[in-house]
Image (cartoon, grey):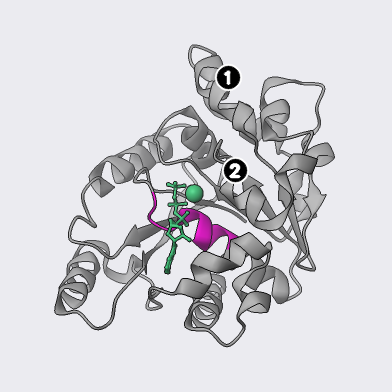
Amino acid sequence: MIITVANQKGGVGKTTTAINLAAAVANKGLKTLLVDLDPQANSTMSYVDARAITKSMYDVLVSEEMEFKDVIVPTSVPNLSIAPSRIALAKLESKLIGDLDGPFRLKDRMKDAPTEYDYIFIDTPPTLGMITVNALVASTHVLVPIQSSYFALEGTDDLLETIEKIKARPNPNLQLLGVVITMHDKRTTLAKDIHDQIGQVFGDRLFNTVITKSIRLEESPAYRESIFTFAPKSSGANEYYSLSEELLSRV
Ligand code: ATP
Ligand code: MG
């Protein structure tokens, strides 16, 4: 199972969802890998000291000599490893464009990984460029976090269109695993309207679990911990746990 977390809108909760869902699944004893494909390296920094990273996904994607398995490092979470990113990855877009195997590079380089891990989560940058396309081509599923806001659905058409294009050719097996609402504020009626609106568009693909706004979720990466050890009793921990249960029941 390879699950890409994608939305080309910035700051909607992709990284927060990827790091905590991966931890929730790993906590169940399932061997889990988090692949950071975002040059911002936020997932990487949430679990490891980025200064200690010498080999990253960039090296794997540009050089045949660097094996995927050789960049993977353990995290503080048992059963969870990470294939880190670093800023150099930003140069990748231009390198892959015009390359015939450009969209397939990640899939080719990761080909042995699905047998070694029960679940692989891929965090992507806020663009629909070559890096995100590589992730979608290599994946079995895509999970879309949508921020609870007035403009929540703006841009999702482009994302869905990209998913359809990838399904049409390079990866017919790609499935929309689900859509999760993030940073929800239960107190406002606007938030309820937004929830209803997203539900109308995505139907049963909308996860029942809603991730509410929580300071704890913002804080935990600074301590290089998942929400489950940083604030185990917080709403964020409960919600990401329940999202993981829903996810596992869908795949
Ligand atoms: P980018 O597009 O830049 O990669 P992203 O989609 O990965 O962003 P995050 O980095 O996960 O989004 O979240 C954006 C900001 O919002 C971060 O500061 C994060 O800590 C915060 N955040 C995410 N989810 C929540 C939440 N449920 N409650 C409060 N803050 C949150
Ligand atoms: Mg991010």
Q: Amino acid at mark 1?
A: Asp
In this rendering, position of residue 70 left or right of residue 57:
right
Residues at marks 1 and 2, CA–CA distance in whole angstroms:
24 Å
The quadrant in which the N terminus is found is bottom right
Q: Give above or below for 227 relative to 34.
A: below
The magenta span reads: 11-19
The residue under the point 41% across, 63% down is: 178
**Few, some or many residues within 10 Å of mark 1 (<14, 14–19, 20+):** few
Res. 24 visible in picture: yes
Res. 250 visible in picture: no
Rendered image quadrant of residue 30: bottom right
In this rendering, position of residue 128 left or right of residue 25:
left
Residue linked to disc 2: 41
Q: In the image, which is nearer the foreground, mark 1 or mark 2?
A: 2
Q: Can you name the residue that lies furthest to the bottom here?
A: 233
The residue under the point 71% across, 44% down is: 50
On whether residue 23 falls in the magenta region, the answer is no
The mark that comes first in sequence, 1 or 2, is 2
- The percent position of residue 13, horizontal first and vertical second, equals 43, 58
Q: Secondary structure at mark 2?
A: loop
Q: Is mark 1 within 8 Å of ligand 1?
A: no
- The percent position of residue 16, horizontal first and vertical second, equals 51, 61
Q: Is mark 2 within 8 Å of ligand 2?
A: no
Rendered image quadrant of residue 22: bottom right
Q: Can you tell which mark lies on residue 101?
A: 1
